[in-house]
Image (cartoon, rainbow, N blue to C red):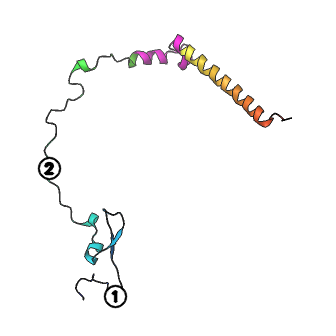
Amino acid sequence: MKPGVLAGAELGIMYYKFSGFTQKLVGTAPTEAYSPQGLRPFIPPEASAPIFATPTKLPGDSASDNMFKNRVPELQKLFQKPDGIPVHLKRGYTDRLLYRTTMALTVGGTIYCLIALYMAANPRKNK
């Protein structure tokens, strides 16, 4: 074998590997081509020192963080009450206002779309 020639190059065989630096395939020795970087034995890195030495605060350590009372039980009672009112209207005036606004916008948008379709289907004639 000639010095400076990759093994296998004499026989017309080239070995390639993916270069992480150039992001392309590069010619390489057969040993590197058959054991790429991802398949080499793993050498664990040394553990680094922690950046922040302050202790972690666990949830529930202090009651002052939770400033709001749990309203889930009372809302469950409100929504599960069999009074014949739809769920989306059970919370009173704001629910009715939001529902009616949504319905008005839906009807208005439908009418607007129908008018736009009519105008697109029947364009004005130029004289």
Position of the C terminus, as image quadrant, is: top right
> In this rendering, which labeled residue sits more in front, label 2 or label 1?
1
Location of residue 104 (image quadrant): top right
Q: Which mark is residue 84?
A: none
Instruction: Point out residue 62 in the picture as x, y percentages from the top left corner.
Output: 21, 21
User: Would you call the spot at circle 1 few (<14 residues within 10 Å), some (14-19), or many (20 or more)?
Assistant: few
Please report the residue visible at 53 percent of the width from the left and 10 percent of the height from the top. Answer: 93
Please report the residue visible at 33 percent of the width from the left and 77 percent of the height from the top. Answer: 15
Side of 121 relative to 87 (left or right): right
Residue for badge 1: 11
Residue for badge 2: 47
Q: Tag 2: residue type?
A: Ala
Judge whether residue 86 is colored magenta. Answer: yes
| Frontmost residue, 68 versus 81 | 68
Instruction: Point out residue 8 in the picture as x, y percentages from the top left corner.
Output: 30, 84
Is residue 84 in view from this perspective? no
**Is label 1 in a helix, a strand or a loop?**
loop
Instruction: Point out residue 100 in the picture as x, y percentages from the top left corner.
Output: 60, 17
Please report the residue visible at 50 percent of the width from the left and 14 percent of the height from the top. Answer: 91
**Is label 2 in a helix, a strand or a loop?**
loop
Judge whether residue 112 is colored magenta. Answer: no
Q: Is residue 58 above or below residue 24?
A: above
Residue at the far right: name it: 127
Side of 14 relative to 4 (left or right): right
Location of residue 70 (image quadrant): top left
